[in-house]
Image (cartoon, rainbow, N blue to C red):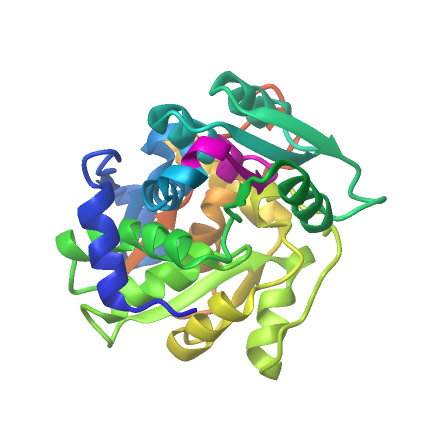
Amino acid sequence: MSVVHKDVLNAYSLIAPHVVRTPILTSRTLNDLAGAEIFLKMESFQRSGSFKFRGATHAMLNLSPDQKSKGVLTYSSGNHAQALALAGRNSGVSVTVVMPNDAPAVKKAATEGYGAEVILYDRAEETREALGQKLCRERGLTLIPPYDHPHIVAGAGTAALELMQEVPDLDLFFVCLGGGGLSSGSCLAIHGINPNVRILPVEPEAGDDGQRSFRTGTIQTVRDPITIADGARTPSLSPLTFGIIREHAEDILTVSDPELAKWMWFVMERMKCVVEPTGVLGLAGAMSGHVDIRGRRVGVLVSGGNVDLGEVTKFWVVRPTD
């Protein structure tokens, strides 16, 4: 099971009629704060509200007629669930989603709104993988996981591919890291065009399994990290995503929840765009000071905007200009 740059190109050819070519935004205020030119690829404007629709659509379009007739299953805290539910509705394929009972209500409602069956589970009592595999066996469903699948990785990489098509002369690229589907796909897309771009995936401090994996050379795990970046509460990278990231990334960074809240508010207040905490992991990493970006051209992938606006004011906020 492997993925290469050509797979990202093929995925883009297949899904282009179905996805939004999302905008690349800049902010003079942000550039002044960073001392750099920053280009934000806004996947918060993607259908279903995140980059996940790209991989979900790619996987759905690659199903056999028999698989389509029986339906598919996934496990997700929200964004992949919504994306697959919408892709299934567009393709006439039934979708079952295993979702933690503490997932954001806005993501659960959207998933059900797209027509998927949601089955809740308790993180403390069972794993989503075990429950998902059990349901697949019982119902004859095809599993489409959130990140550990070649079609998901290749589809996810098309967002960075679009960025490179418009801004090919980047020096650095920052992207959120959960299970690694987006980061690994982005690595393949970017280095297939410009191998000199320095790629830095970013994860929440509480879920630092990726950083520990990268620095030790073996896959590390974390159990139910407590972070506002709910989309990055994955237990570990997969062999597929870890292998690609380790080959192409310079390092993996971590940022705190207060930093995520700070840059989420910046994007919403100064750029007038709704984003979720997980979505600004890349931006928080770029602005963290862990890597010197001054004088550089910096790409940042903003991965999604599915935030419960009723919960936003509960996030601890420190604005960048404070």
Q: Is residue 154 above or below residue 220?
A: above
Whole-percent x, y for residue 306 in the image: 49, 30
Q: Residue at x 19, y 57 (%)?
A: 164
Q: Name the residue nearer the viewer: 144 or 276.
A: 144
Q: Is residue 255 above or below residue 87?
A: below
Q: Is residue 71 left or right of residue 160?
A: right
Q: Is residue 234 above or below residue 309?
A: below
Q: Residue at x 44, y 71 (%)?
A: 245
Q: Is residue 6 left or right of residue 59?
A: left
**Location of residue 154 (image quadrant):** bottom left
Count of numbered circles in the view: 0
Query: The magenta stretch spans which residues?
Result: 68-82
Whole-percent x, y for residue 242 in the image: 51, 70
65 drawn magenta: no
Q: Is residue 148 left or right of residue 230?
A: left
Q: Is residue 263 left or right of residue 213?
A: left
Whole-percent x, y for residue 294 in the image: 32, 66
Q: Name the residue nearer the viewer: 45 or 117.
A: 117
Whole-percent x, y for residue 55 in the image: 38, 46
**Location of residue 161 (image quadrant):** bottom left
